[in-house]
C-alpha cells in the first residue's frame, strides 16, 4: 500500500488556492504549515478550473483531508451534527459487521462444522472395503527359516 499523504497535502494546498480567503483563514496556521512542510513538491497537480470539484482527479487521501477540514472548520453546527451522526452510524455498522464476522461462538461452531465434515469424509474413506491377505501357518514357518538361513527367493 502506497503512502499518498505527501501528495495529498500538495493537492490540498493547490485546492485551497481557489477557496475564498475567509474560509482558508478558519483553518489553523499550524495545520496549513504542516501541509506545506510535508507536501510532495515534486507531485505535479493542478486544479482544472474547467471541471467541477467532483470531476477533479483527486487522491482518496485528499478527499478525506478536505472532508475533515470541512467538518472541523467550515461546517455549520447543523452540518456538523449531521456529519457526526453519519460517522457514528457508519462506525456502528462496521462494528456490527465485525461482530457477525468474528463472533467467537459462531467461529467455533463453524470450526465444529468443518471438523464434522472432515470426520465424515475420513469415515467415508475408512469404511471402504479392504482386502486382507492372511498367511497360512506353514508359510510363516517357511519364511522364518528362510530368513534365518538367508535363503532368498520364493515367498
Image: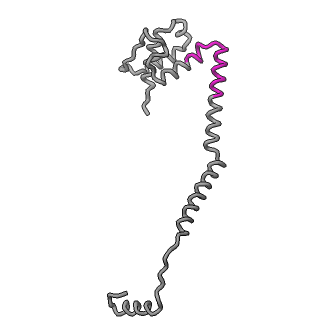
84 drawn magenta? yes
Please report the residue visible at 54 percent of the width from the left and 68 percent of the height from the top.
126
Q: Quadrant of the N terminus?
A: top left
41 drawn magenta? no
x and y percent of residue 88 in the render?
65, 27
Q: Quadrant of the C terminus?
A: bottom left
Left or right position of 124 against 35:
right
Badge count:
0
x and y percent of residue 128 in the render?
53, 69
Question: Which residue is more in the foreground, 13 or 67?
Answer: 67
Tell me, what colour scheme is on the image?
one colour
On the image, which quarter does residue 154 sit in?
bottom left
Please report the residue visible at 50 percent of the width from the left and 74 percent of the height from the top.
130
The residues colored magenta run 69-89
x and y percent of residue 13 in the render?
45, 15
In the image, residue 72 sits, relative to residue 145, either above or below, namely: above
Left or right position of 77 against 133:
right
Please report the residue visible at 52 percent of the width from the left and 22 percent of the height from the top.
64
Question: Which residue is more in the foreground, 152 or 48?
Answer: 152
Left or right position of 142 against 109:
left
Please report the residue visible at 51 percent of the width from the left and 6 percent of the height from the top.
21
In the image, residue 132 sits, relative to residue 46, either above or below, namely: below
Left or right position of 111 against 155:
right
x and y percent of residue 3 in the render?
44, 29
Q: Principal SS element in the magenta part?
A: helix
Amino acid at each position: 500500500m502506497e503512502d499518498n499523504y505527501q501528495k495529498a497535502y500538495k493537492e490540498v494546498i493547490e485546492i485551497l488556492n481557489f477557496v475564498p480567503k475567509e474560509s482558508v483563514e478558519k483553518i489553523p496556521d499550524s495545520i496549513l504549515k504542516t501541509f506545506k512542510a510535508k507536501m510532495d513538491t515534486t507531485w505535479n497537480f493542478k486544479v482544472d478550473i474547467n471541471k467541477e470539484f467532483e470531476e477533479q482527479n483527486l487522491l482518496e487521501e485528499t478527499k478525506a483531508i478536505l472532508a475533515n477540514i470541512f467538518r472541523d472548520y467550515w461546517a455549520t453546527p447543523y452540518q456538523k451534527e449531521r456529519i457526526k451522526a453519519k460517522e457514528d452510524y457508519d462506525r456502528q455498522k462496521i462494528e456490527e459487521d465485525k461482530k457477525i464476522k468474528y463472533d467467537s461462538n459462531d467461529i467455533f461452531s463453524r470450526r465444529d462444522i468443518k471438523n464434522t465434515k472432515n470426520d465424515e469424509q475420513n469415515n467415508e474413506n475408512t469404511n471402504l472395503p479392504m482386502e486382507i491377505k492372511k498367511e497360512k501357518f506353514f508359510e510363516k514357518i517357511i519364511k522364518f527359516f528362510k530368513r534365518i538361513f538367508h535363503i532368498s527367493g520364493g515367498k
